[in-house]
Image (spheres, grey):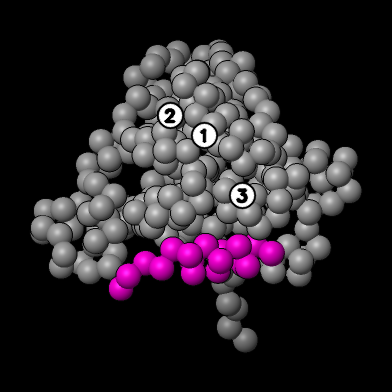
Amino acid sequence: MKFEVEKEVNHIVNFIRDYYQKNHLKGVVIGISGGKDSGVVAALFTKALGSENVVGFALPCHSHQEDYQDAKLVSDYYHFPLYQIDLTPAFDDIRKEVGKIQTIDEITTKNSDINLKPRLRMSALYYMAAFLSEIKGGTYLVAGTSNLCELYVGYFTKGGDNVHDISLLANYTVEEVIAIGEYLKVPEKVLYKTPNDGLSNQSDEEKLGVTYRDIASYIEDKNSVSDAVGEKIERLHQNNQHKFHIPTCPREIEES
């Protein structure tokens, strides 16, 4: 089925406007990473709400300066403010405190370090959303930026980038997100940038061991990829189900 980008953009914009009107909301806070997903989300919200109701935040944490420059390309193009909150000191303080409990090194804390960063970022975004809601006289939401391919294989941090108030791209593959970005004229340097988490010095596809194109194909038709690729995608999908569901112990039913 052909992807009708104009139709989909109008659908998303109407979804935003309807939700904001129904719930008497004012604005949105977006973490602008310098990648395509946050760039496309920013473009959609600007179109739906106007740039005056969109606030972007760059949240470096031992990050590359290029990421901020790319984030600035997005905010400059769509004319919304971009503020920077450096989370490096908070990250370092937590590691320092953990080091008082247990001797640590970069190998043993690699996974903890990678996941701490998006958790700190989401805390900062929610802090700013509450702050802006107070001073602007209306509720600001925190936007999610994950796309369908990432979500299908569980490529996100639980308690980090999966925490948000509204999600626009969760039902769109990477290729569809790029098509939306092209339509909305997201800066090319951002839109076609090799996807990476900005945390591990690896591309997304290097970390996953599969391509986003293969993931999208597999979602549409499980027989469209090789058995080996299909098994890897399905394994990622199944192994990360715990990120979507919090088990709740039921009460024991007493027999009368």
Q: Quick one: label 3 or label 1, which is nearer the N terminus?
A: 1
- Give left or right: position of 224 versus 197: left
Residue 33: mark in rendering = 1
Residue 201 at x, y = what percent?
A: 35, 24
User: How far separated are the C-alphas under marks 1 and 2?
Assistant: 8 Å
Which residue lies under the disc numbered 3?
143
Q: In terms of secondary structure, where does tag 1 sit?
A: loop
- Which image quadrant is residue 101 in? top right
- Give left or right: position of 192 versus 234: right
Q: Quick one: label 1 or label 2, which is nearer the N terminus?
A: 1
| Residue at the bottom extreme of this rendering | 256
Tag 3: amino acid: Ala
Residue 13 lies in the magenta stretch: yes
- Give left or right: position of 226 versus 125: left
Which of discs 1 and 2 lies nearer the camera? The answer is 1
Residue 198: mark in rendering = 2
Q: Residue at (25%, 53%) from the top-left corner?
A: 213
